[in-house]
Image: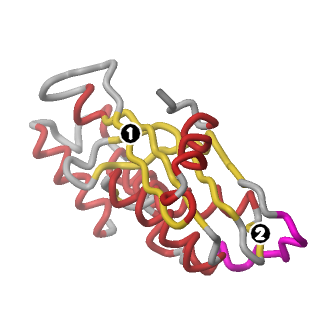
Amino acid sequence: MSIRSRAMAALIRATGDDPARLGLTGTPERAARAHAELFDGYDINPQALLAKAMEPADGYAGLVLVRGIRLYSHCEHHMLPMEGLVHVGYLPDSHLLGLSKVARAIEVLTRQLQGQERLTREIADIIEKVAHPKGVAVAVVARHHCITERGVRQTDSDTVTVVTRGTLDSNPGLRRDFLGLCGLAG
């Protein structure tokens, strides 16, 4: 039995159940495989992934917005799911990012234990480091199961985090445009 399987069996025991019970036989191994997949983001460098898909901007200077990237992660405080949407905008300087690689880099980051605020910042950091844009903005809207399923049980609550840098921070009109296009204005 692997260390992950033993950990899952210990978790089952900690809930008050028996991992050898008929309905749970095989569960520690299945759960270990599932968690290995859920947290495989530690094995991939999202910055290197994003850097592989750059192309010259060829004079394009407008806002590039990739919105509605599905977020499914686990909070680092309770290890419970959080799910929602990530919106990324940037004003290119000399290079454009591969759009599917933006989504893939975000997926890598979400397959780690995360805090929503840190995740929002990390996405902006990676885009800045790789593309050196004139400005970048990241908005994350997520529902946290630690709020909806336990404690205060606020089932309609979501959390919004926004990071803006460069011209998307210093130009209120561009920031407003970004937020509006993400459905977060006003």
Q: Residue at x 33, y 19 (%)?
A: 156
Residue 76 within the segment the image draws in magenta: no
> Tag 1, which secondary structure?
strand
Badge 1 density bin: few <14, some 14–19, many ≥20, Cα 10 Å: some
Query: Is residue 57 inside the magenta stretch?
Result: yes
Read off the magenta span.
Answer: 49-60
Q: Of 35 and 92, which appears nearest the observer?
A: 92
Is 105 left, or right, of 75 in this rendering?
right
Q: Which mark is residue 160?
A: 1
Question: Residue 74: image x %, image y %?
Answer: 35, 49
User: Which residue is drawn at the image coordinates 46% and 45% (left, top)?
Assistant: 140
In the rendering, at what x and y percent does residue 152 appear?
Answer: 14, 24
Q: What colouring method underlies this structural image? A: secondary structure
Q: Which residue is mark 2?
A: 96
Residue 158 position by quadrant: top left
Between marks 1 and 2, how big is the CA–CA gap? 26 Å
Residue type, mark 1 in image = Val
Amino acid on which the number 2 mark rests in the picture: Leu
Q: Of helix, strand and loop, which one carries label 2?
A: strand
